[in-house]
Image: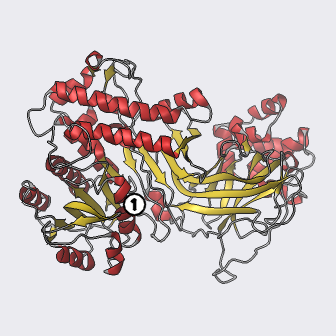
Amino acid sequence: MLTGKELWAAIIDRLLGNESLREQFFADSEAVLQPYNLEARDIRWFSRIRTLADLEKRQQEFAKSTLSGSSPANVPTSKGVLEGAAAEDETIRVVNTGFSSEDEPETPLLAERPLLISTLTYFWLEVGEPIEGSIELVPTALPEDLPPKARLQVALFGFQSEFELTPTAEIGELEVQEDGSAVVVKDAIVPPSLRGANDLLDKRLFFPVKTPPAAGKHHLRCNIYYQQNLIQSRLITMHVSANPQPMHDALVSELDYNLSHSLNGRQLQGMGENRLSIMLNDNGNGTHGLRFFGADDTAQKKELFKNDAELTEGALQDLINQARDAFRKVAWGGGLYDSSKKYRYYQNVTIQQLQKDLVLLAKSGYRFYDSLIKQLANGRSGARELKKLMLAGGQIQIAAKRAARLVIPAALFYDYPLDTSLAPSAYKLCQGFQDAIRSNAPLERCDCFQGKCPSHDDLETVCPSGFWGYRHRLGLPLDIAGAPDAPVVIECPDKVEFTIGVSTDPNFRERPKHEARLKKLQDDIIWHHADTRDEAIEAMQETSPHVLYFYCHGGLSGTVPFIHVGDPTKDRGITPDNLGAYDIYWEGRRPLVFINGCHTTALEPDSAIDLVTAFVEESAAAGVIGTEITLFEPIAVAFGEACMHRFLVQRQTIGEAVRGARLNMLKSMNPLGLVYIPYVMANLKLV
């Protein structure tokens, strides 16, 4: 293990040879040096180096250079075998993962040998040619068109009572090079025996983990982020034993969330930068894990936030049910919907009614949010960090692992301090918000919705800006195995093409005027109209619109959800399997599907997720807009028109359009824009 001047020389050589790491060093030397676990005197010595000239001068002062090429730890890796690989003269770039021992971190452990209990080991990740010893179940190739100098954050997450992680060594960072390879620009940790192995350290990230004392099967999760967008997630499964004996698949890394199947460069660039990414997944043991990863770019230097929480499936489902119950109380007084329910926001809405309903929603949203942050791994300090991170508005990704059926009502999250135990009459409505709805300015310009609410710390005052759905741009993109990459653009250099399928239910009294206003969004809009099931199927087969819009009923055939277009007494529904049976697939332009379902509980998330999945997987839709609860026509009309105007005419991203439509409704004293769910990349837009 290198120490003293030999160690200084090795680090100097690495900084001179790795331009990206050098830039990081000049910006924040302590962050770059922290993974080396240096002593105070070493850090003081490096603190005097502030320029490239300083580095070159220090290198010349050493009698012997410790270039990484001479390090015994710089072990070459073999190419291995990759099914379907290109010709030998083409560069292959895949994500490799594995484990190595504390004594020989440069040597991958065999995938067929379990790990020893209660032992420090290293999990490693490297992007490059396939490595002998990688534990990837299916090696995933990376293309060469990734954004130049793109930064990928790699974060390691544990599971309760399993592997022990080191809090200061859970995040590493790679920078993609023009040839598709990736260079380390932020180590998670530098193993002591590799302090001089600069070539290896420049391409491989190491994470220290301690195996649990209990033998058996255990797990880690490794996530790759780009601008806080979760791109790929791997479930690492390891067998641990007191007496390790060779066994099949003792160590396996399985890619089980893959938003970008190819990590296409143009797609990555269009995703935009998230303030926060939350991944929800079923842990397989009756619990659900939530993995938080974000960045605060409002500070002088960018600060990363990483944390996780765990809830039982029953507890999470109960919170979701309570949230939807709150929406139902606001919409029609509560209980499951039936035709006798009356819409509470038809007309003559008073500020008192709005205040009462916002308090009801805020109490539900705060309790949901509080239940999650109480479970954060580092407790109260993590909760405070998250609140600080989320104060200003930003883009948020809620990532659902494939086959996940629970949909978090993130728009309802309320994170301003609130005493939920007061009598209803004790609460006040933020005066800044009240002034804003009386003014002519859009709510977006109000201080409250820019992280500057004057009532933020008043536990007895509710402000709508405390809801994530009003303050942030949300996206809930689905990872579906058979679907192509979730797009971030829909090409539209000229005329907008719009396909609409409607129910002809005579009780839909607002439909004709709603259709007319949508058709007038643009003078030269290409309009396709369907008011029967057959016409709707034909339109989906023969048109490639920018938006496929349903103004419809829905239903359940047993447990199978369907959309009902046409005469509700005659026409049959359109079920998820119909999309495949009728070969509905958008190979070129991939539309945004908007399901504005009125007077039906069948299109709530528990049932509708199969329809959402089918549109994305079977038909390659760009995404789907759905709802938390059934709708009354005035909600569907007001939100649909505002959202489509912003998306199609103003060319806002869908995240901006959904948020803006919610605020439009709120400006009209209606809080029910929060019920919409965007199963789509928040940055999707027409270009």
- Crowding around mark 1 (Cα neighbors within 10 Å: few <14, some 14 to 19, many 20+) is many
Across and down, in percent, residue 461 comes to 32, 20
Q: Is residue 136 above or below residue 43?
A: below
Q: How many marks?
A: 1
Image coords of residue 295 (percent x, y): 53, 40
Residue farthest front in this picture: 558
What residue is rendered at 21% in x and 49% in y? 631
In the rendered view, would you say 213 is above or below 520?
A: above
The answer to whether any part of residue 155 appears in the image is yes
Residue 450: x, y in percent? 35, 32
Q: Quadrant of residue 685?
A: bottom left
In the rendered image, residue 46, in percent from the top left (x then y), is placed at 77, 35
Q: Who is closer to the viewer here, 518 or 333?
A: 333
The answer to whether residue 586 is visible is no
Residue extending farthest to the top is 426
Quarter-of-image position of residue 440? top left
Q: Nearer the viewer, residue 677 or 162?
A: 162
Would you say 86 lies left or right of 618 here? Answer: right
**Residue at disc 1, secondary structure:** loop
At 15% from the left edge and 73% from the top edge, which residue is drawn?
Answer: 532
Q: Residue 686, relative to residue 676: is it above or below?
A: below
Task: Give me the residue at 70% from left, 82% from top.
Answer: 88
In the rendered view of the protein, which quadrant contains the C terminus?
bottom left
Residue at image mark 1: 488
Q: Residue at x 62, y 32 (%)?
A: 378
Please, which colouring scheme is shown? secondary structure
Task: Relative to 653, say whether 504 is above or below.
Answer: below
Left or right of 82: which side holds 600? left
Q: Amino acid at mark 1?
A: Val
